[in-house]
Amino acid sequence: MDHSPTPRTPAAGPAAAPPAGRYSRTDDRAADRKLRIAAVVCGVLFLGLIAWLGGSYLLRETKLNGTVPTFQAVSDTELQLQLSVRKSDGTAGVCTVRSQGADGAVVGQSDFQVPAAGSSYVEVVTLRTTARGTTAELLGCTPGKK
């Protein structure tokens, strides 16, 4: 009996390559390329949407932009406030102001016309209320239709 070690042949030596077509590198590269292209297209569309929304916001804001710097409760049914509006020359519109009472309930809301003349409009206006107003808040200004 021969007790010498028998040479072992590797079970999967150089012929151990995966079967052809099973783990294809070319398919992975093509899929990666398609995925990159889809990501770039989505990114460009997203940036375009952000630019469009930002541009429309800026254009809307520069046409008519108002504040209520001061207000005073004249009585339980009236609130006088200073309406200050910066606008493009020739742009008319409407500014909406509301007042709330001490309990937070809305006690008055009204729209005030802004004339087209000039690039600014500052006026003391009277807001009628159902109870004593403790705030004067400008909800927004909307340019008129041309």
Image (cartoon, grey):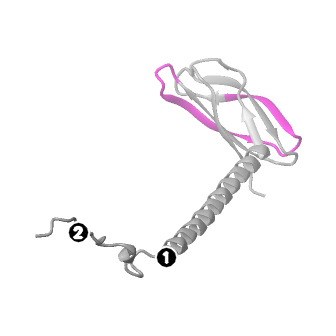
Q: Position of residue 59 (x, y in %)?
A: 76, 50
Q: Quadrant of the C terminus?
A: bottom right
Is any atom of residue 98 visible in this view?
yes
Which of the two discs, 1 and 2, labels the residue nearer the N terminus? 2
Residue 143 magenta = no
Q: Nearer the viewer, residue 116 or 47?
A: 47
Q: Secondary structure at mark 2?
A: loop
For the residue marked with disc 2, what is the amino acid? Thr
Q: For residue 94, which quarter of the picture?
A: top right
For the point 72% across and 24% down, the residue is 69
Residue 95, image quadrant: top right
Q: Quadrant of residue 88?
A: top right
Q: Which mark is residue 27?
A: 1
Number of other residues with Cα within 10 Å of mark 2, as a class: few under 14, some 14 to 19, many 20 or more: few
The magenta region covers 101-126
Residue drawn 81% across the image and 43% down it? 115
Q: In this view, which residue lies farthest toward the bottom? A: 20
- Image position of 5 with respect to 55: above or below: below
Q: Is residue 62 above or below residue 40?
A: above
Q: Residue at x 65, y 17 (%)?
A: 74
On residue 6, which mark appears?
2
Alpha carbons under labels 1 and 2: distance apart: 43 Å
What amino acid is labelled 1 in the image? Answer: Asp
